[in-house]
Image: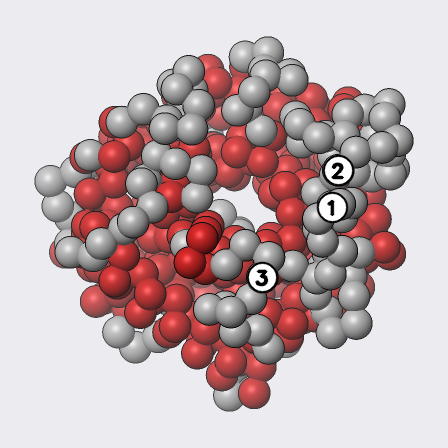
Amino acid sequence: MLPKSSYCKIRITVILMITAVSCLFAGEVDFNAKFFELCDNACVELARDNLHVRGKQHYRDSYSVRALGVAYDMTGNEEYLEACKKWSDKMIKLQNGMTPAGAYYMNYGRKPGETTGNWYAADCASIAQGVLSTAVRCPKGSEKKVYMDSVKAYADLVIENYIRPGGGVTDGIWSKYDGPWWCSTGIFGGLAFSLYYETGDEKYLNAGYGTIDWLNAQDLTKITPYTLEEQGPAMYMYVLEAYAAGLPFIEPDTARYKKVMARYDEALAWMEKMQVGRGGDNKWDYNTQWGSKSGGLAFHMYIYAKHVPDMYQICKEADKELEYICSEPINDPDKAVAENTFTQLMNFTMMSLAERLSPGTMYRR
């Protein structure tokens, strides 16, 4: 496994390469302007008191928070970091009242102080990634420790209670299904790899490997509950979180690595058929619950591109889709919750824009 210094050198090289590619394929949409417009709007959204408000699930915010971390790295603008810290502080305050201990409050389902009701590991893994993104950017050690302790409390809860033989992760306390699930496995896998990178604790690395191995063994066209036919973009958005965060820790030419790359090939072939910006037919409206995750698929394309010879072409295709989203559907209202002016599509598109403008910064490697 490579030391951290090697990841940093590789990251710098990749940033220079993809920056050059980005210049070649720059289209009509100003990605930089759109990204910072969304960042400024996200800061306003995160500052609102949305506690217990319908349609304001905390997992949504976490993707904006992660993108704001990149915006902070790019600019040094303290307003971006402050927005992340205030949101993370809210998550921790709510977490302190949750049962089981270490769980986050999702802004729906089981509330702080309650001991019954559904609580989902998938949504909470997204929240944890937002808190972790905040932690690693805090200059004060004492401040960082509070955020890191919060994330580790959640991760340890899952490792001790919700990982099943084979590495799959159940969705916490879900009355509908108690087996390992693709969504919770993918998102928690992404968190586990990132937490390993920041702490060096191999229990997180092993948990990450377990999620990859379980996902590699699944046929995503048949897996349930909630099928690819039903969820479409949401399935690949979440499953690939484990792969995107885990790739630097998977040795090339191993059986595990080959299966990972095969999964990416499968995912990109599926994306080509449904991404409207590339001439596809997306039956999931971009501003619906599942369709909104389409905004984050270009993020995964940019991540994958760094690991294959045809990087230029993949970046070009990702740009086409991102340009389409930023010029058309991102301006449309939320079809699920009409009063949401900051839509889910915006949350997930921020992830893609962040990776497009500052490759590797999202995962700091």
Residue 224 marker: 3
Q: Are marks 1 and 3 in contact (CB under 8 Å)?
A: no
Residue 196: image x %, image y %? 70, 59
So how many labels did they put on this image? 3
Question: Callout 2 environment at 10 Å: few (<14), some (14 to 19), or many (20+)?
Answer: some
Sequence-wise, the earlier of marks 1 and 3 is 1
Q: Is residue 294 left or right of residue 126?
A: left
Whether residue 240 can be seen here: yes
Residue at 20% over, 43% down: 323
**292 horizontally vs 110: left or right:** left
Residue 174 image label: 1
Q: Earlier in the sequence, mark 1 or mark 2?
A: 2
- Observer-nearest of 225 and 363: 225
| Circle 2 residue | 118
Q: Are marks 1 and 2 in contact (CB under 8 Å)?
A: yes
Kind of residue sitting beneath label 3: Thr
